[in-house]
Image: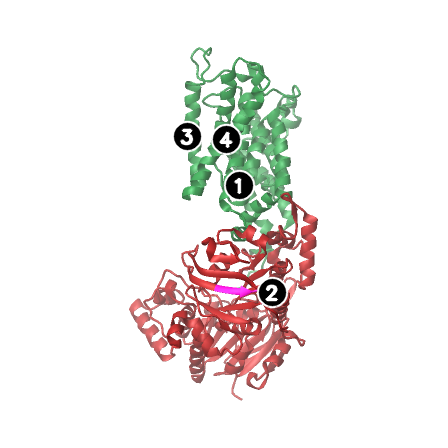
Chain colours: A red, B green
Amino acid sequence: MSTPLLSLSGLTKAYPGVVANDNVSFEIQPGEVHALLGENGAGKSTLVKMIYGLVRPDSGQMMLHGKPFAPTRPSAARAAGVAMVFQHFSLFDALNVAENVALGMENPPPMGDLATRIRDVSATYGLPLDPSRTVGELSAGERQRVEIIRCLLQDPRLLIMDEPTSVLTPQEVDILFETLRKLTSEGVAILYISHKLEEIRTLCDHATILRLGKNVGTCIPRETSARDMAELMVGSAFAAPERARRNLGEVALELRDLNAASPSAFGTSLKGISLSVQQGEILGLGGVAGNGQDELLAALSGEIRSDAEAVRFMGEPIGRLGPGPRRKMGLLTAPEERLGHAAAPDMSLTENALLTGAEREHLMQRGFLRWGAAEAFARRIISAFDVRTPGPDVAARALSGGNLQKFVIGREVMQRPSVLVVNQPTWGVDAAAAAAIRQALLDLAAKGTAIICISQDLDELMEISDRFGALNEGRLSEIRPAQGLSVDEIGLMMGGAHGMEVAHV
Amino acid sequence: MLRLEQRPQPSRMWVYLTPLVAVVITMIAGGALFAALGKSPVEAIATIFWEPLFGEFAFYYRPQLLVKAAPLILIAIGLSLGFRAGIWNIGAEGQYILGAICGAGVALAAYPSENVLIFPAMIVAGAFGGWAWGMIPALLRVKFGTNEILVSLMLVYVAEQLLAAMSLGLMRNPEGHGFPGSRNLQQYEAAHNAELITGSGLHWGVAAALIAVIFAYILLNRHILGYHIRLTGQAPRAARFAGVRPNRLILFCLGTSGALAGLAGMFEVAGPSGQISIDFNVGYGFTAIIVAFLGRLHPVGIMLAGLLMALTYIGGEIAQSNLQLPAAAIQLFQGMLLFFLLAVDVLVQFRLRWIRTEAA
């Protein structure tokens, strides 16, 4: 076998109180797509940060092209041919594509040359992108292309990609995979971080699986089932959610031609959304991020008011009501952003339990808080949803993403809602916690709650929803029964609700 | 190399420790300042902190401590509610003046009646004056989105003009031989905010400050409104999600802090100061901002901070007269206190770590 492009041996990195990476070793060959698999908190990020020069290992060694490699800064890593596309883009909305690319370069060439090079690279790798467009107008998929092209201009030998498909439509994923295959055919190696197992099975040649900072196994994804990989990740068999047959009751929530302006300048306004959801039913709403998901949740929670008649809860017009009264009636919501929206980061879990539970759980009496009851409520959420925390006095931001998400979802589920609206209920949550959250939603529906689940995880939506619709630029597609929908159909629904009507003629 | 590292949880210990550390550092830096001015630093610091409490003339200074601390605490309690919610009332000085004008206005209008209801009516009028002055930035913010910091601050200067106009015109003492300033309310029994115990400095304003501390404590720790105030300051988006109406909170916070500042002004004009005059206001409204932060925006902390601030005022005056320290040096000393508090504050959220420098 030839010399590996990059070999890691015995990499260890400890932070106060936690060993993020414990003696991790593996090799990446030139021209391969190597998957790095693991739950949240398994140490994937720390590992790639070490390769990219953002974090220095405590011990262990890295070899690049057979030579010792110890980057002290990202620029050193880039100079050695290591590039990285982050999960969260670092782009300036007000600048155009070429300017954004130039900002990430050590010695940017003149703008004209750069634009030409961007066009060349985008044509070569099948990544359509106009260098003169303003980034603020680009879709998430296009923004990612800016990041990828920024990397490709440096001629990398190793490209690290951190959960690249979380913001893409199925069609955009295909384009991305094409590009990645073209790159590997030229000998570029790709380190691909994801926890979407099907995706890894189609794309990756090898996979290294991390659990609690340790390398717990390698496999060839094409020859391993998704279930086996998931069990390696989690370390134990976990139950797939069960779907009991549910009896649908009367319509619990109905939207009729809901229009609402987004409160933020870069947000998406809602345009003519109509839907209804029955008791015991789960309606899944897909769509690429930034197509009105946050606004729809806000319009349902009461943070955005609308025409009274546009939102009906058990037949009553509630469009003008704020979050408090809606919650009191039984319409509960859980927004996507855990820290700062669903929970106050610096407040304790007890205080956060109070945030939405005060009224329904009788945590106050004539405005005076019953701290004992609030703490008991927090404890009940913690135990019912297996939230791993030393206790209810801990600040919300001290919890890991998955645990806080369980707390936030649990807080709403425990209040026995008539209608529950969740946005990205399992975003950034490890597989076991995600399964628990989905199961909780299914159980709640079985008891007769109407649920709207907004998510970008199509597997999740297909797993739990009865009917499926997609948001696109603030409009809602036709809503169809989830069972039997093909990936192509879903892609079309996500790509544009307007196109569908033509297709049906 | 020293590096700051974020703590996983805000440190409880440092929340209580930082004010003390800030006071100690201020003493050291202030001592250096006084030494540079050619005074003995130990003597200067001792004069400021020791003399008013335990010195030869402490019997005179101790009551002064309450007299000076009461308005500071009363105003700072009100300000702290808004500050907690991210609503910045910088114009307490103006609300303090308006409270005094309205309170004194009631008394002067009723003069020379000795009706027992005059003093209660003055309290209501004083609170109303401050409240109304605070509602101006509040309503402008709610209706037009103006910045309450600027508007409330500007209104201080309007209030000062109004005060001057009152002392020269409408409220001028008709028996005052043409000198500016109103009748002295200390000589008008029904309106006089007299000491409750002679020689103690304890007047109704001190009682009101104490009551405000207790109420604020209950509000912030036991009531949903206080919870919403804290929530709004810490996570505004989460607050809207919880159902807080930001506009109502703005009206409440600016109104309450205005009313408390107005009360402070009214107690001052009816008691220690005695009359409406051009130089009636001495900066309590601004110093209260320092007191609020020095006290960690916590009611009990504010009470202690108010007493400490009053101490540096009185001690500063003694140092000026006994040691011939310039007034500016004293003000600088007080400014240092806030400066160091904010600087040391970083240790609540971060910890310092020594890191060996490595050759890059």
Do marks 3 and 4 share a subunit? yes
Kindly identify which residue carries mark 1: B82
Gap between marks 3 and 4 measured at Cα: 13 Å
Kindly identify which residue carries mark 3: B158
Gap between marks 1 and 2 measured at Cα: 34 Å
Gap between marks 3 and 2 measured at Cα: 54 Å
Badge 2: how crowded within 10 Å, few (<14), some, or many (20+)? many
* Magenta span includes A277: yes
Subunit of label 2:
A
Identify residue type, mark 1: Gly
Task: Kindly check if marks 3 and 4 are in contact, taking CB atoms under 8 A apart as contact.
Answer: no
Do marks 1 and 2 share a subunit? no
| SS category of the residue bearing label 2 | helix
Task: Kindly check if marks 4 and 2 are in contact, taking CB atoms under 8 A apart as contact.
Answer: no
Kindly identify which residue carries mark 2: A402
Q: Position of residue B63 (x, y in %)?
A: 63, 24
| SS category of the residue bearing label 1 | helix
Identify residue type, mark 2: Gly
Kindly identify which residue carries mark 4: B130
B199 in relation to A47, above or below? above
Q: Earlier in the sequence, mark 3 or mark 4?
A: 4
Number of marks in the image?
4
Task: Kindly check if marks 3 and 1 are in contact, taking CB atoms under 8 A apart as contact.
Answer: no
Subunit of label 4:
B
Magenta stretch bounds: A275-280
Gap between marks 4 and 1 measured at Cα: 15 Å
Q: Earlier in the sequence, mark 3 or mark 1?
A: 1
Do marks 4 and 1 share a subunit? yes
Q: Position of residue A264 (x, y in %)?
A: 43, 56
Task: Kindly check if marks 4 and 1 are in contact, taking CB atoms under 8 A apart as contact.
Answer: no
Task: Look at the magenta stretch and give its main secondary structure.
Answer: strand
Subunit of label 1:
B
